[in-house]
Image (cartoon, rainbow, N blue to C red):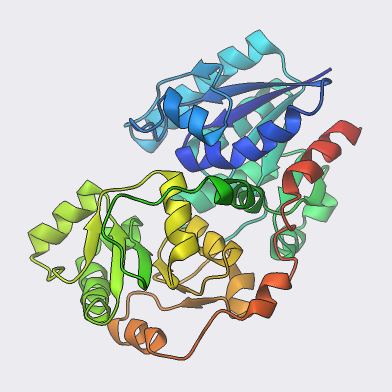
Amino acid sequence: MIKILTILGARPQFIKAGSISREIAKYKEIEEIIVHTGQHYDANMSDIFFDEMQIPKPNYFLGIGGKSHGAMTGQMIEKIEEVALKENPDWIMVYGDTNSTLAGAIVASKLHIKLAHIEAGLRSFNMKMPEEVNRILTDRVSNILFCPTDTAIQNLKNEGYENLDCKIVKSGDVMQDGAMFYKNLALKPNIEIKNSFILCTIHRAENTDDETRLRSIFEALNEIAKEKQVILPLHPRTKKILENLKLNIQNLTIIDPVGYLEMVWLIDNCDFVMTDSGGLQKEAYFFEKQCITLRDETEWVELVECGANTLVGADKEKILKVYRSDSKFNIQNSTLDLYGGGKASENIIKELLSYE
């Protein structure tokens, strides 16, 4: 019997981890214990959320959130350590780059528990991003580095990981597994939607906390919305910032944040995507949608290289130029095996079972 202690802190991590959990359920020789740190707890993560998403409910809820990086990470280390000592797992499994991820990695390294990092090797090369620090530190103490792409593997090789006591595995991306699973469960949001629309999301602090960038982005979006419906699920905090800046957003279809199954429907039915989200860049690709990324860099460089994604930063003129270009999603791009073709979860579990 292999016991895995899975550390999760944000709703997107639960959605990704759901694919792994559904795969684990096929094996009697694996037991998974799920810990929810509470880092990004929201009211939508009710029992209904877990039932609708077909995700196992957490075994532990630590309730740690809404604090500074240091306080949050420190308390997570303390509480995760208590659970690890009680459960005595063979593996601690962490996802991505949150403070919960780093806390789980530190506990594993201190207690000498094997650590599996899913979504390893990703780099933005921007050390001002707390996520970049988290992912680098987590990679360094991991026993198995499950990389979603060849680019991620090359990043680790460039940093000398082939000389370290760890195993680098190209697993594919569990996010694609989830996208394929949830496509058939998608729900249409209860809003007025035209036949042709753009799906847009803006949430990163580099945009929302910078008045110049935010103003430039929304001036471009409002211009685009004169020609085509722009549906923008927006966090109340960002909406308040826009109101304080007195930006013209009257042409946009601004809605409250939607559930994941509704977001899947919007991605699947939109013309194309405009976003500063890392995850949505990939989901656009999974659903064969062109993506305009409102950031200066991306971890998913392979999407830029294959032409499915275009970086425009926060430059109004560049945003409008790319929007008005003839750039369309190349169907041939979707045949490229960039992210594992929906078999990442299967690859990860087989690797853990065979690890020596």
12 sits left or right of 168 in the view: left
Of residues 197 and 141, the one nearer the viewer is: 197
Residue 215 screen position, x and y as percent: 20, 71
Q: Is residue 162 left or right of residue 120?
A: right
- Extreme residue toward the top, this view: 86
Residue under the point 52% across and 67% down:
298
Q: Position of residue 268 (x, y in %)?
A: 50, 61
Quarter holding the N terminus?
top right
Please identify the quarter of the rendering in which residue 294 is found.
bottom left
Along the line of sight, which residue is nearer the eye, 217 or 178?
178
Q: Is residue 338 left or right of residue 326?
A: right
Looking at the image, residue 70 lies above or below residue 313: above
Q: Quadrant of the C terminus?
A: top right
In which quadrant of the rendered view does residue 232 lie?
bottom left
Residue sitting at x 77%, y 61%: 157
Q: Is residue 88 above or below residue 135?
A: above
Q: Can the viewer see residue 125 in this picture?
A: no
Residue occupying the point 63% across, 42% down? 138
* Position of residue 324 measured from the top left corner of the image (x, y, whole percent): 38, 89
Q: Position of residue 345 (x, y in %)?
A: 73, 43
Q: Residue at x 16, y 56 (%)?
A: 241
Is residue 321 visible in the rendered structure shown here? Answer: yes
Q: Quadrant of residue 229?
A: bottom left
